[in-house]
Amino acid sequence: MPEEAGFPHAKRFRPGSGPLSRSGSCPPGGRVVMLTADGGGGRRQQPPLAQPSASLYPEAVELQRRSLPIFQARGQLLAQLRSLDSAVLIGETGSGKTTQIPQYLYEGGIGRQGIIAVTQPRRVAAISLATRVSDEKRTEVGKLVGYTVRFDDVTSEDTRIKFLTDGMLLREAISDSLLRKYSCVILDEAHERTIHTDVLFGVVKAAQKRRKELGKLPLKVIVMSATMDVDLFSQYFNGAPVLYLEGRQHPIQIFYTKQPQHDYLHAALVSVFQIHQEAPSSQDILVFLTGQEEIEAMSKTCRDIAKHLPDGCPSMLVLPLYASLPYAQQLRVFQGAPKGYRKVIISTNIAETSITITGIKYVVDTGMVKAKKYNPDSGLEVLAVQRVSKTQAWQRTGRAGREESGICYRLYTEDEFEKFEKMTIPEIQRCNLAGVLLQLLAMKVPNVLTFDFMSKPSPDHVQAAIAQLDLLGALEHKDEQLTLTPVGRKMAAFPLEPKFAKTILLSPKFHCTEEILTIVSLLSVDSVLYNPPSRRDEVQSVRKKFISSEGDHITLLNIYRTFKNVGGNKDWCKENFVNSKNMMLVAEVRAQLRDICLKMSMPIMSSRGDTENIRRCLAHSLFMSTAELQPDGTYATTDTHQPVAIHPSSVLFHCKPACLVYTELLHTNKCYMRDLCVVDADWLYEAAPEYFRRKLRTSRS
DNA sequence: GAGCACTGC
């Protein structure tokens, strides 16, 4: 069937068309220093600097290190970086920049007076890089080279090169905004523009300037990015020079469709089977779709079709991949397929950056992604299927050429591609800023309203966050200046959304801190509930025993209590469709939050069987996130009268309580409230009489 | 009457 449907692609080979081709062109923009594998401008041999005892161990690691393209440019690079306060470094994948630059700087003596920090957007990356570089330096992780991520600090007094998540460095900046420990901060993967990296841009820039003014040890800042579009980075860091490093990416052929595809799922299916019938079975396929439901449906269809293929056609091993898939099933994408089987991995954008799979020869890119958008008019975050940006499309394409040359089928026309946005909108312009502002205020930045963001969030957006922090009682307005109240300062100590931090701080008043710690931990990690669509009935019947008519929070609390009672038993998790990995994480988060409470000398009490106090506590801290039942049986939020609905995943889905607190609004097809708790309207008025008086006035007008 | 991209502290 699909093999007859006709392949939607025009055969077009476009060598050197994108940033991934070998013949990478010079990046656009001003001062560009070319540093290529053959030495670029000059091939001077640099005298060996503080080279450790590597020569005593003529092992493969060192050889490999020297064979990296970057090695030839080492001397020149080091000379440049040593003389510069700030630099932007572009390196294609495989250039070795992340593992080598920190070592070059260290060997060049830059780590002598302070630590060299290298930030990463993801924990696993920070950990594996530290391990890798430790190996290269022939030391144990945690000695010369270490890492710091949440729950895990593997550093010591000897640590000179430290890999850490961007969020972790940001948190460190709260207690020391000048980053005094560090002589150099390398912001890696800057092109990803995570909210943490974006805030760090401003933090390191300010620290650099202030340290200079105070005559302290200078702070060197290196921004590393994979994309060539780095004008913004360079401009932001006062015209910092851009250094270009050649990589070792294999060539990738790109095919566009002749016609726009109105049904990208069908087009993907056709493409997969076209490839499957033509290519040797050892070559695997990676398909990018948008979400769990789509991926599961497509996986099923592929398996069904694969059963009825003509003789001589390879077998097919179809593997779905998305973040909420249980860990054991995620791992299957790394295992080799049995002989004669082709792996077809159907994935969300998790395979774009977070998970790298070897052996991918073909990438099928639908050009679609599910992502959060911020709607400045309604102030709502909307989760919607949309077009990827050009940068994202290149990232997906690059997944085909990691070990050898590859092929990427783009299920859109070249004209369509040209109309894609150049870059993904940075996260900082797409999400709630309350947490970021709280952190900046905790760092005592002089004025959050004029903070030097590389890409400024809209003023509405900032105002909304300020309003939220104000409602939580975190802000003090003094002489036109915003500062934190004592409560606000305490809130900033928790690695949580501000409203959850406030919930914890209020809990002693309701004698239920133990329970609130559990609930907040459960809400701040990915869902602990696993809901395979194919086993829905089974899931529902097994979950009945935990369900509380008081809502999702109490239900989750019941599940956690039982989990603890069975000692975190894995079989219990499986039988009850509980994601054990996430549950373990909940326990870790809870321990961390409890620690912070203890350090603040907060009394930690349990409400025992009393759930009303827990709900009162939630009502008092989340009063700005409430909805009321309307006469027509629908719900509307209390503050803006936005029509909302109970999310189908809620235990209250079939119920109609009069008054609800929710923890999140999610706009998909409808505006859904997630994680609901039944509350008494009186508690809300009690919690914020002033707020609700104002609400009443606005509703009358 | 019907659904949840991905990170991170």
Image: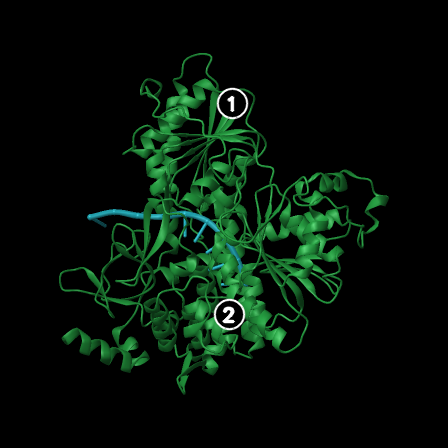
Chain colours: A green, B cyan
Q: Which quarter of the picture shows residue A533?
A: top left
Q: Secondary structure at mark 1?
A: strand
The percent position of residue A492, horizontal first and vertical second, equals 49, 73
- In the picture, measured across the screen, residue A659 lies left or right of residue A354, that is left
Query: Residue A31 appears at what percent x and percent y?
Result: 55, 54
Mark positioned earlier in the residue sequence (2 or 1):
1
Q: Using a 10 Å C-alpha cutoff, classify the residue at mark 1 as few (fewer than 14 neighbours), some (14 to 19) or many (20 or more).
A: some
Q: Can residue A522 be seen by looking at this rendering?
A: yes
Disc 1: which chain?
A
Q: Residue furthest top?
A: A311
Residue A163, how many percent across, how many down?
64, 56
Identified at 32% across, 28% down, the residue is: A258
- What residue do we see at 44% from left, 44% from top? A392
Q: Which mark is residue A494?
A: 2
Q: Decide: is A525 above or below A308.
A: below
Image-based side of A320 in relation to A109, left or right: left
Label annotation for residue A341: 1
**Chain bearing mark 2:** A
- Check the image and report above or below for A76 versus A589: above
Nearer to us in this view, A382 or A12: A12
Q: Amino acid at mark 1?
A: Tyr
In this view, the residue in front, A642 or A630, is A642
The amino acid type of the residue labelled 2 equals: Phe
Q: Position of residue A362 (x, y in %)?
A: 48, 29
Q: Is residue A609 visible?
A: no
Tell me the quarter of the image containing the N terminus of chain A: top left
Quadrant containing the C terminus of chain A in the rendered view: bottom left
